[in-house]
Each structure stands twice: as structure tokens, then as C-alpha cells.
Image (tube, rainbow, N blue to C red):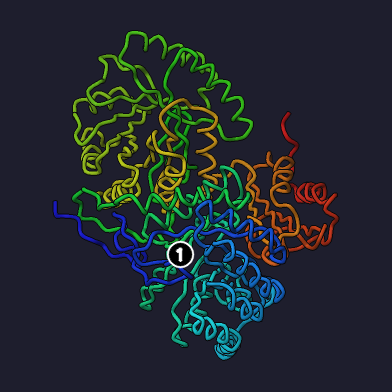
Amino acid sequence: MPAQTIHRSVWSINPFSFRRRPTRVVPVGNVLVGGSNPIRIQSMTTTPTMDTEATVAQVLRLARAGCEIARITAPTILEAQNLENIKKSLLQKGCEIPLVADIHFRPDAALVAADFVEKVRINPGNFTDGKAFKIREYTEDQYGAELRRIEQKFTPLVLKLKRLKRALRIGTNHGSLSDRIMNRFGDTPLGMVESALEFVRICQKNDFHDIILSMKASNPRVMVEAYRLLASRMAEEDMDYPFHLGVTEAGDGPDGRIKSAAGIGSLLEDGIGDTIRVSLTEEPEAEIPVAQELAERYTKKDFSSTEETLDVSYVDPAGPARRPSRVVKTGPIELGGSAPIRVVSPVVLAPSGAHELLRLLEDRLKKDAPPEIIEIGYQPNPAFPSLYQSFRSTLAPETSRLAFWLSFEEGKLPAQLPPADGYVYRCGDRFEPREIESLNSACGPKGVLVLRSSSVLTLVSMLGLKVLEGRMVVACLDPGSSTQTVHSLRLLAAALRRAGSDVPILLASNGEDPDLAVAIVQGSLICDGIGDAVSVCRGPASRDRLDFAYNLLQACGSRLTKTEFVSCPSCGRTLFDLQSTTERIKSKTGHLKGIKIAIMGCIVNGPGEMADADFGYVGGGPGKINLYVGKNCVEKSIPSEVADEKLVELIRQHGKWVDPLS
């Protein structure tokens, strides 16, 4: 076969191997962002900006935790002026961490803040625009007039930043686009990109280039598509500005970490991203270890090109549809096609295994997130046949809801194959055709054969065996080094398309990989539209592993099996305690399935950045809460003491409430 060639994509130099997107270097104080510099770690303070002592103490804690750039909100001129006191106090304490002023709606505050910080962040959706959405058709002349208005208000800041040698972040948010952008492009990734580029062009007109851009969204798929589209547009216009990555309002706990890893990791896999922030509804110091773990993967590890020699091209996955695949049925479960991405639970069979699995099933079926396909590793010992039979007998009442697979290592097939809904054949970089023929015969007309190899070439060769024509087959690429998995799976999908094969693909994780690495790899592929099932890891089908699998699918927008919470990480604008409020609302609504609830600390970002939530709980003033249905505020200034009950009542009124199971 001819050697693999580099297929240039407008968003990635080569989708089959890792390479950092080339960018210019932007100084943020004493920290260099972009170019060959490490991926920088950022966070944001949650204290009131006017409380100098508390804000300084929090910045010091962030710096000790490893934060390299700290952002502080400056909603008014008063807060912007107090940045001077914060900066002086930090320097007196020997802390030189660069500060970023976070600006919404107030160009005048931005101009003041620029005197005291190393970078100013503006949101192009509201820097010169109000909050009210107005439906209007803009003529070209009217649109041009709007751009001139923006330029008039924005240019003074650009010139001041240029004179003071400060950096600028143009930070677009999915849910806070301007009326002008919304009317022309809608609430879309394209709208996000155009919103940012309007401001970039004004900077370039004034020969100012110390710019960093971000395209944040609470939905990782939207966020990934927006950054890829931005990289594409910037390549077309010969722009090379660094990117700041983040999934905004990711939430807390495992959900927030998985969602951040899926979104941020998907882009870092493509070499996109120069500085990151993990937005958790927790103390800001808790964000730093997560961000460091994500960044370390791309700072210390060497990603080389895949070793396969396949002449294939790759479909641009910016805004991808799910990869077309045939439907195969394994036991009662449909896999592939338009069926949900399935969860495969590898099980190490032990005498108590069936009873433990039964208890797990009883718990998980209440949550609509049970095991679906049980993969049992064959053990070549005399006790296995009776143990396997006992396992199947104990679970016999559940066979209408479960499929059972048996997995075999190459060269370890027994003479007599136990019955199963599917057989998994695992081999290295070669295979034995006679063993595949034996498994094919044992499958019968309704059984599924899962072919699993660490080599794309080997897997494609196995799938091409004539004996398998018409057979229900699933392809699985065994993870070797986790740094190669995303690129190898992309290569597999491209090779299957080239071969005219539409077999479903199972995404398997390395049992030794940490959760964030698995979330990066599988989340990235799911965002690419690749994958019809996920295997959580080798080991027992435990509750936490199933939670992880379903949390990942929910984070990627593939399967909603519980309430999704969009909660901001708090900042100096927040009007209530976000952590305790989020936990309280979760305890009351966490049993609901398939709805999204946004918990936002302030009126500035809340209504916009909870863009696609079903219900919103937003700070409207001290001790006051505004409730939203979609983007519409339906109740204002509710006393916080009764707001939780009012939210439940609102969900009930819209037919989304069910009582929790006892």
C-alpha cells in the first residue's frame, strides 16, 4: 500500500497525528502564551472585587495551586479602579501572577482596568450591545453602520492596550451573542466565530496583534465545532492568534470534569489550544489540578504519526453527523445505525458476579442507565463452564434486557464454545483465520462477532475475510498507548469508508487509563461522530464505571439519562452561594430525566449563557431569584427562601416533573 500522506484540513494539520496548531506568541505579563510555550493554566476569582483582602488571598491560593493567569471581574468602573489596589497588594506579597479584567457591557470599565492588569477580556456579544433580543432584518448598509458603531466604541480600548503593551482576549460565549449576530447568523457556532472576527479585524486595522480568542459554550459539541470553525476561518485569513479553551458552566463533581475533558480534550487532540480553564462550580483552586492533568498530556507526551500505511482521506468533522453504520442486533439490543450509543460492561467472572450484577441492575434500571451488553472474559480453566452456566441461569430473567458477549484472546479458543449473543475475538497485529471461522460458525444466524485488534491494518484485513460476508460484525480497535487512540480510530473510520464498510465501531478504553484520559479519547471521537458503543473498561461492571460511561455520553449530548445541570463557576458578580445552591437544587431535581436546568449566579451572564437550558434559576438581585423557561423570564425577584419550591412548581406546570422513586 502507498504510504500515508498528510491530508491538510482547514482546522487540523493532520487528523491522524498530533501537532500543535502554529500560533504567534502573545505576552500576558511575564507569561508567554502560544507558539511552542506550554499550555497555560487559568482560573477566575469568586470573591467580590471590592473586597481587596479576600480577592488577594484567593489569587495567592490560585498561584500556589499552579494557576498561571488569574481573571477578576470588573462589572463597573469602581471594581475596575480597585484592581489597582489588588495588583499592588499582590506585588507587595511577592506574587507577580498576571491579572485579567473580565468585562461585560462596560467599555468605560475596560479602559480603566487596562491601567492595572496584564490582559483585558471582553465579550464581543455585549461589549457595545444591550441584553434585549430584538428581531430585525439588517440591510447591508444597516449592518455596516452597526460595525462602524462598534469600531468607534472599541478602538479606544485597542489603542490603549497597544500603547500599554497589554493583551486582549476576545471571548465569545454561545449564549450571549448580540442582536446583530443573532439576526444574521442565529445562535450558532458560525455566529460565534463571526462575532469574534468583527472585533479581530478592528484590532488588525489598528496594527494590534496581542490577541487571544475563545469560543466558549456549555455544550461541548457546540464548543468544539466553534473552535474548529474559528481555526478554519483564521487559516483562510492568515491569522495565527492563540486560543483559550474552556467549556463554560461545566458544573461540579465528576460531571463537570468529564464535560470539560470531552470538550477541551477534543480540541487539544487536534493541537488546538494554548491556554485552558476548567470552569467548575467549586472553589477555584479545585480547577487547577484538573486543568493541569489535561494540559500535561499534551506538554510532556510525544504524539507521533500513526504507524499505519493507509492512503485515506478524512472528512472534516466540524459540525459532524454521526458516522453512518449498519444496525446489528445482539440479543435484545440494537447497536449501530440510529440506535443510542450502547454501553458495554466488561465483567471478570467470579462466584458472586451474577448476584452483584443483579443488585446493580435493580439500582440502575431505576435511573434508566443499566448495563446493556455484558462482556465476559473467557477463562481457560475447568471451573469456568459451570461458573458461566450458573451466571447465565441467575440472570435468566434479565435476558430480555441484556446481551451477553464472550471474549477470547487469540490462540485461546476452547474446542467447545459456550453459547452467547456475541463473541469478541482479541488479537494483536496478526490473526488466525481458522479461529475467526470457528467463531463465525458458533455465532449462528443471530449472533454478533466483534473483531478487536491493536492494528488498523489487521482489523481491516479481518473484516475483509470472505467467510464474514453477510455476518453481523462490530469493529473495535484495542487501545495501546492512549495518546494514539483518537488518531488511530479516525484512521480506522476513514479506512472503513474507503473499503465500503459500514460496520459499527466499539470504542474501548484502556483499563489502566485515568478517567480524564478516557473522557478525552472517547469524548473526542463521539464529538467527531465516531462510535456506536463504548466499553467502560476491563473489570467488574461496577456502579461507578457505569456512572462514568453514562456521564460521558450525556456530556457529549449523545444520551440523556438524568437531569443535566449547567452551573456557572461563580465570580465576583455572583448574587448567591453557587455551590450550596447547586447541591440543594440537585438534591430536589436530580432524579428527573432528559431535562436541563441552568443555575446562574447573576443577571449579566445568566440569561445568555444558559442558552439551551429548559429551566433557569438566575440571581436577579441580593436575595432575589429570577426563573426562566428557555430564554424567557417567567417570574422575577422571587425571595430566595421560596425559589427552590417555585422552580419545582414551574417544572411541574410544564409537565416535566415526576416524583422520585422511593
Q: Residue at x 31, y 17 (%)?
A: 417
Crowd tier of the residue under label 1, counting other residues whose Cα lies within 10 Å: few below 14, some 14–19, many 20 or above: many
Q: Residue at x 72, y 40 (%)?
A: 587
Q: Residue at x 31, y 37 (%)?
A: 478
Q: Give x and y (percent) for residue 411.
A: 22, 23
Q: Nearer the viewer, residue 310 or 155?
A: 155
Say left or right for 302 vs 590.
left
| Three-letter code, disc 1 | Tyr
User: Which image quarter is the C terminus in?
Assistant: top right
For label 1, the residue is 227
Q: Give x and y (percent) for residue 550.
A: 53, 39
Q: Nearer the viewer, residue 279 or 197?
A: 279
Q: Give x and y (percent) for residue 286.
A: 57, 48
Q: Give x and y (percent) for residue 92.
A: 59, 65
| 149 in relation to 460, above or below | below
Say left or right for 67 vs 142.
left
Q: Regarding mark 1 in the picture, which secondary structure is present there? A: helix
